[in-house]
Image: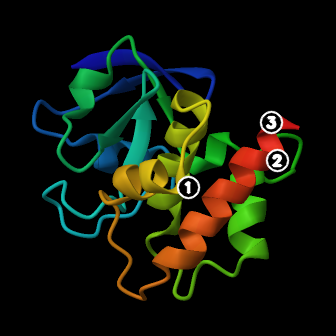
């Protein structure tokens, strides 16, 4: 089946199988930031934004992207400049192995886009959907709060 959707701001027309997952389609289209951790929608490594909503791409069918707007980490870089969230995660050394970070970046982008004034508890509540096996949660939360403060300036 052929679908058309927006990927990181560009229109895409592509054939998908009826049982193909969005994560697999994104990989096929070269979006290597999207990671599969659990395959059941529990870890957040595969998080992307679909129509500005946070979605686990490992449990969404590719066909469900038809007519929608999908964003991955690759779409956050503008003119070869990192997004403020990415800068903050680096500044706070919020990552060890980095496997979970793309999903966390997309979760943080969701927070920045949807919470004008998020408290630390708000950030933690939304980030609970992301599992970081290295245990860098405190620095991740600090980085997200820093990116939020910077975006208000």
Q: Earlier in the sequence, mark 3 or mark 1?
A: 1
Q: Quadrant of the C terminus?
A: top right
Would you say 57 lies left or right of 88 here?
left
One can see residue 27 in this view: no
Q: Earlier in the sequence, mark 2 or mark 1?
A: 1
Residue 91, picture quadrant: bottom right
Of all residues, the one furthest to the top in this rendering is: 67
- Residue at 35% x, 84% y is 133
How far from the left and from the top, in percent, is residue 106? 51, 48
Identify residue for label 2: 150
The crowding category of the residue bearing disc 2, from other C-alpha atoms within 10 Å (few below 14, some 14 to 19, many at least 20), is few
Secondary structure under tag 1 reads helix
Would you say 82 lies left or right of 57 here?
right
The crowding category of the residue bearing disc 3, from other C-alpha atoms within 10 Å (few below 14, some 14 to 19, many at least 20), is few
How far from the left and from the top, in percent, is residue 55? 32, 39
| On screen, residue 98 above or below 109 | below
In front: 27, or 54? Answer: 54
Identify residue for label 3: 152
| On screen, residue 15 above or below 99 | above
Viewer-nearest of labels 3 and 1? 3
Identify residue for label 1: 105
């Amino acid at each position: 089946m052929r679908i058309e959707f927006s990927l990181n701001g560009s229109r895409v027309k592509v054939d998908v199988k009826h049982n193909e997952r969005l994560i697999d389609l994104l990989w096929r289209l070269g979006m290597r930031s999207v990671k599969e951790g659990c395959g059941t929608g529990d870890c957040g490594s595969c998080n992307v934004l679909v129509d500005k909503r946070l979605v686990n791409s490992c449990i969404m069918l590719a066909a469900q992207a038809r007519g929608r707007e999908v964003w991955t980490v690759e779409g956050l870089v503008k003119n070869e400049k990192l997004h403020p969230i990415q800068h903050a995660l680096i500044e706070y050394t919020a990552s060890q192995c980095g496997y979970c970070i793309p999903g966390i970046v997309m979760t943080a982008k969701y927070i920045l886009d949807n919470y004008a004034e998020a408290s630390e508890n708000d950030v933690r509540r939304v980030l609970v959907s992301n599992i970081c096996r290295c245990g860098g949660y405190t620095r991740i939360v600090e980085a997200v709060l820093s990116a939020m403060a910077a975006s208000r300036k």
